[in-house]
Image (spheres, rainbow, N blue to C red):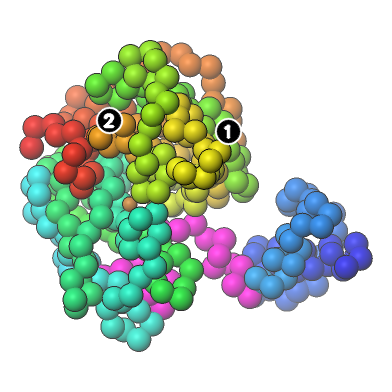
Amino acid sequence: MNTALRIGGYTLGLLAVFGGALGIGAAVTPTATSAATSSPTPGDHTDMAAMTAAPAAGAATLPGGLMVSQDGYTLRLADRAVPAGPQTPLRFQILGPDGAPVIEYQTEHDKDLHLIAVRRDLSHFQHVHPALDAEGTWSVPLDLTTAGEYRVFADFTPTGHDGLILGADLAVPGPYEPVALPEPAAIAQVVDGYQVTLAGDLVPGQASELTLTVSKNGVPVTDLQPYLAAYGHLVALRAGDLAYLHVHPAGEPGDGVTPAGPGITFYATAPSAGDYRLFLDFRHAGVVRTAEFTLHAGDTVGAPTSPVTTTPGTGPAADTPTTGAGHDDAETVGHGH
Ligand SMILES: [Cu+2]
């Protein structure tokens, strides 16, 4: 493919992304292309991908988790509101294009479906794995001790389809005080002497390398245990609308090159500048713990200043320690409920 065609094809893809149904060719210039993105390197597949993916590019570039229904699949919660409590059952179905509950899933990261629940102020994060019954209804208990507006995300791959992340609101009636988003910080203190340090910049619009380094009592942890087919599982949500970022780990346990710590590397794509909340689940000594960070996309993570606590630091009203909160693993650290 010559350069002109390459640029043309690439521009076409961008137009599909940015212009939606606008007529193609109206105001296309190569300059606009190069200004809008980094230029494709010779020989890569960016141009072809842009062309072939053009019809679906608009949908593909929308961040996950913002919609309750996408590509014919719908997340249907059994209840829009559930009572507060430490073990409140959540029941839901994934409805397929034919309107029937989906029963066949493709396993990703060791599970057929990952469920993330978080209060809309980005506190009270939980990552659990519901059970599926024969009728296609998923169920899992959630720790909804604290009232508020929650967002529930189902992260799954229907057999024969690309992965989807659908989101739905869940109300937990009762009085509550929203907590402010903690300031960006490069260090998260986790209970039991664990500390996690974040290095890397979240650059809007591109896969950004983030490395989270785990230590315990000041000693680097080099024997992390696989959790969900990785040495860590990272969820990143945009403050403001809880857009769910695409994140994938660099390497996996047993591939011969990925170390079991202390560093865990991910690639995360932030859809825009702004603030994001990151939740790292990692497993060590048989226990899954979570470290939380606020990261501002577009800026550099500064030198460590004052250590910032995770959930407990979000305010005196926060009653749930970050660590161990919300995992369904029996071995997870308990904390008073
Ligand atoms: Cu999961």
Query: Any atom of ligand 1 within 8 Å of the CB at mark 1?
Result: no
Q: In what element is the residue under mark 2?
A: loop
Residue drawn 90% across the image and 62% down it: 3
Residue drawn 73% across the image and 76% down it: 23
Where are the magenta residues, as a range? 55-76
- State the quadrant of the N terminus: bottom right
Residue drawn 72% across the image and 70% down it: 51
Could you tell me how far apart the alpha carbons at marks 1 and 2 are, in whole angstroms?
Answer: 30 Å
Left or right of residue 317, residue 65 in this image: right
Q: For the image shown, how many numbered marks are present on the structure?
A: 2
Q: In what element is the residue under mark 1?
A: loop
Vertical comparison of 29 with 209: above or below: below
Q: Type of residue at label 2?
A: Ala
**Which residue is label 2 attached to?**
285
**Which residue is label 1 attached to?**
201
- State the quadrant of the C terminus: top left
Q: Position of residue 296 (x, y in %)?
A: 51, 34
The quadrant where residue 320 appears? top left
